[in-house]
Image (cartoon, grey):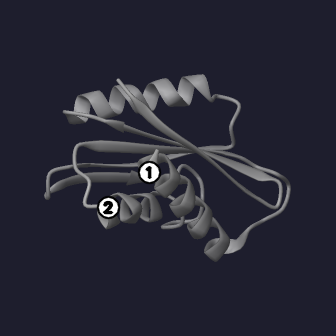
Amino acid sequence: METGKSIYKDRGSKFLGFAETIETEDEAKARIAWYKKKYHDARHVCYAYRLGSDLWRTKDDGEPHGTAGLPILRAIDAQKRDKVLVVVVRYFGGTLLGTGGLMVAYREAAKGALNN
């Protein structure tokens, strides 16, 4: 399995983006669990995935509602990707980014991972 990766930094926070192909929702859930275990020391492990036009999921994982999972899903949809999971891991740098800053950071980390 090939994984696209990216790093986005803003005011001390580091966002690690990962994109990979998935075939089923069970596979997505297993990979999400793997990322949560591997990056257990991160503040947030947010994600979105799409499997066809009718099946998609997002998770903000403690970030303000709509500031993480939805921007990740929008990055997936902007590239018209399907059967893909994107996970963005955030290490908090001590400075609050605000909702706009968070949305940009998660979108850019997702976009970078999808492009790689």
Residue 22: image tag: none
* Residue that appears at 56% across and 54% down: 109
Q: Is residue 55 left or right of residue 13?
A: left
- Against 68, residue 24 (above or below) is above
Direction bottom: furthest residue = 100
Q: Position of residue 9 (x, y in %)?
A: 73, 55
Residue 38 sits above or below residue 59 on the image: above
Q: Is residue 60 visible?
A: no
- What residue is rendered at 52% in x and 52% in y? 112
Residue 103 in the figure: left or right of residue 11: left
Say whether residue 42 is visible.
yes
Image coords of residue 72 (percent x, y)? 44, 58
Q: Secondary structure at mark 2?
A: loop
Residue type, numbered disc 1: Asn
Kindly identify the amino acid type of the residue bearing the numbered disc 2. Gln
Residue in the picture at 31% in, 34% down:
28
Which one is earlier in the sequence, the residue at label 1 or at label 2? Answer: 2
Quarter of the view holding residue 43: top right
**Foreground pick, 44 / 11:** 11
Q: Nearer the viewer, residue 75 or 99?
A: 75
> Within 10 Å of the Cα at label 1, are there few (<14), some (14-19), or many (20+) other Cα atoms?
few
Pick out the residue farthest to the front. Answer: 116
Q: Position of residue 23 (x, y in %)?
A: 19, 33
| Quadrant where the image shows the N terminus | top left
Q: Quickly name the residue at label 1.
A: 115
- Residue at image position (62%, 29%) is 39
Task: Tell me the SS state at disc 1.
Answer: helix
Q: Position of residue 38 (x, y in %)?
A: 58, 23
Q: Is residue 64 left or right of residue 12?
A: left
- Mark 2 highlights which residue? 79
Report if the CB atoms under discs 1 and 2 are less than 8 Å apart. no
Q: CA distance from mark 1 to mark 2?
A: 9 Å
